[in-house]
Amino acid sequence: MPDRPEGVLRRGWTTGACATAAASAAYNALLSGAVPDPVTLELPKGQRPAFALAREELGEGFARAAVVKDAGDDPDVTHGALVVATLRRGPPGSGIAFKAGEGVGTVTLPGLPVPPGEPAINPGPRAMMRAAIQSLAARHGDTGDVEIEISVPGGAKLAEKTWNPRLGIAGGISILGTTGIVIPYSCSAWIHSIQRGIDVARANGFAHVAACTGSTSERAVQAHYALPDAAMLDMGDFAGGLLKYLRRHPLPRLTIGGGFAKMAKLAAGHLDLHSGRGQVDMDWRADRLAEAGGTSDLVKAARGANTANQVLEDAQAAGVPLADAIAARARDATLEVLGEGTGIAVGVLIVDRGGQIVGRAKETSRDS
């Protein structure tokens, strides 16, 4: 994720809020023949934003409206995407049905908030759309029996930049958002994806998952253990988000993989591994080098080193197993966060910039 810019950041709207605004406008058109523009929407916490329509259409048996997603100052892959709602009358008594249109995925694996075979429209947005439709139906004396088809042109391409293919969501993006509001750089979407990845792994009976800080370490760890894609968790810098969720939703085995600098942060007890949020000082690494058998000259050089990787390279050249020592400390710090009673066996692999495994800590659990 890019570094957070300075200053006050502008909030945005989730795909769920945009879908609800578009669906509300389209239902208005079905009821009255007129499309409100802009359309005002009441969000779950009471905010009432107005959404300008980018497209509107009233045809034989259907109405369509679209909103361009504005994610504010958040680096969201769906920022600028067109969220389209097409509404059609349903049979009397059928209620509200949801359908995935172009660019919206379909769930194929268990473990997600909606079951396999359903459109990837999460419960929060479904609830928002139901509330909006039911409110309009009551106001106009209508039954509210409608099919809501949500589409996002280009959504299949956008989904390649998300976790959806790994989570078993085929054909497009998910329609997300509990509150309707995007808080810039809150990282909630990333942590949500980590949690859903754990849910899918548990639901599909995976005994072993791996959580990695980036693509290089992920490729190395996945190849080392021959793990399927659905067992790989894109942890990024969010070790705390991963471990706190696993503490409540345990799996038998966890491998954590990452570069030396980030694993040193975890080893020192940091749960946010971003380079700009908390640092491991060189004296701490130098002390670990001394414990691993480094000479006094090597330790002295480590105290004045410019980067963590310089310390690692010097240790490797001297044959000192510093990466193994850091991996062991990272494993122990992970076990400390997971606590007793989970039964999770944890191992750690440290991967260099070339994708080679240079340090490892064997799996162990606090309950073994």
Image (cartoon, rainbow, N blue to C red):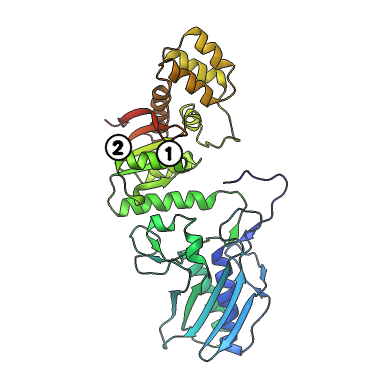
x, y percent for residue 292: 41, 15
| SS of the residue under disc 2 | loop
Q: Residues within 10 Å of mark 2 (few under 14, many from 20)?
A: some
Three-letter amino acid code of the residue under disc 1:
Ser
> Of the residues tagged 2 and 1, which is closer to the observer?
1
Q: Is residue 73 above or below residue 290?
A: below
x, y percent for residue 44: 57, 64
Residue, x 71% and y 44% (percent of image)?
6
- Judge left or right: residue 254 versus residue 174: left
Q: Residues within 10 Å of mark 1 (few under 14, many from 20)?
A: many
| SS of the residue under disc 1 | helix
**Quadrant of the drawing holding the C terminus:** top left
The residue pinned by badge 2 equals: 343
Work out whether residue 340 can be spotted.
Answer: no
Work out whether residue 312 can be spotted.
Answer: yes
x, y percent for residue 60: 52, 92
x, y percent for residue 26: 57, 81
The residue pinned by badge 1 equals: 217
User: Distance of mark 2 from mark 1, alpha carbons?
Assistant: 25 Å
Residue 183, quarter of the rendered image: bottom right
Q: Is residue 205 above or below residue 71?
A: above
Which label is found at residue 300?
A: none
Q: Are marks 2 and 1 in contact (CB under 8 Å)?
A: no
